């Protein structure tokens, strides 16, 4: 994993919880898709892992050159394949999208919160985006919702 994010980069992380009887299949599917994800234009990092205790939880960490590359990935066939597999193999899927600017600004306190004024999810106040298994995560916000900073 790279030590430093660069301005403009986007990070997508996903917490995936497999159906107990489908844990092995989700493991195999997720790790078989890594090469296709890494081959997408603008993919700078592609890491996946499973819970160390053998629980049916998996983590996916992707760093993209910029928002356009992340959005292109979310429209790509490999992402549709992943979402289709999650519909069958997972009971829960949570996506988090973070702009590097928020991480680089030195904001690191824990907690939950709304998007920052830049309209992206802040690393220091992460917000998990619940996403039913097999559905597409919501589009990246271009502007914060009304009434939020």
Image: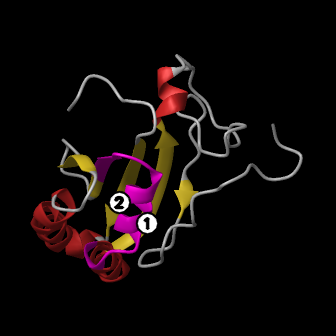
In-front residue for pair 46/29: 46
- Gap between marks 2 and 1 measured at Cα: 6 Å
Dot 2: element: strand
In the displayed structure, 56 sits above or below 21; it is: above
Q: Position of residue 137 (x, y in %)?
A: 51, 67
Left or right relative to 143: residue 101: left
Q: Is residue 50 visible?
A: no
- Disc 2 vs disc 1: Cβ atoms closer than 8 Å? yes
Dot 1: element: strand
The circle drawn on residue 92 is 1
Q: What residue is at 59 percent from the left and 43 percent from the top? A: 121
The circle drawn on residue 34 is none
In the displayed structure, 4 sits above or below 117; it is: above
- The residue carrying mark 2 is 16
Q: What residue is at 34 percent from the left and 72 percent from the top? A: 90
Q: Position of residue 18 (x, y in %)?
A: 30, 67
Residue 67 lies in the magenta stretch = yes
Q: Quadrant of residue 3?
A: top left
Disc on the earlier residue, 2 or 1: 2
Left or right relative to 48: residue 141: right
Q: What residue is at 34 percent from the left and 45 percent from the top? A: 65
Q: Position of residue 129 (x, y in %)?
A: 56, 57
Q: What residue is at 25 percent from the left and 74 percent from the top? A: 78
Range of the magenta residues? Answer: 59-78
Left or right relative to 111: residue 12: left
In-front residue for pair 103/39: 39
Q: Position of residue 126 (x, y in %)?
A: 56, 39
Left or right relative to 21: residue 106: right
Q: Is residue 1 visible?
A: yes
């Amino acid at each position: 994993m790279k030590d430093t994010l660069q301005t403009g980069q986007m990070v997508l992380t996903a917490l995936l919880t497999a159906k107990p009887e489908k844990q092995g299949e989700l493991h195999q599917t997720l790790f078989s898709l890594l090469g296709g994800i890494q081959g997408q234009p603008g993919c700078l990092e592609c890491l996946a892992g499973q819970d160390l205790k053998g629980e049916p939880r998996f983590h996916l960490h992707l760093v993209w050159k910029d928002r356009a590359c992340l959005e292109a990935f979310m429209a790509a066939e490999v992402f549709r394949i992943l979402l289709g597999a999650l519909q069958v193999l997972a009971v829960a899927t949570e996506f988090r999208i973070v702009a590097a600017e928020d991480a680089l600004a030195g904001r690191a306190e824990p907690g939950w919160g709304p998007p920052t004024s830049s309209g992206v999810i802040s690393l220091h106040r992460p917000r998990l985006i619940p996403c039913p298994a097999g559905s597409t995560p919501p589009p990246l916000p271009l502007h914060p919702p009304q009434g939020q900073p």
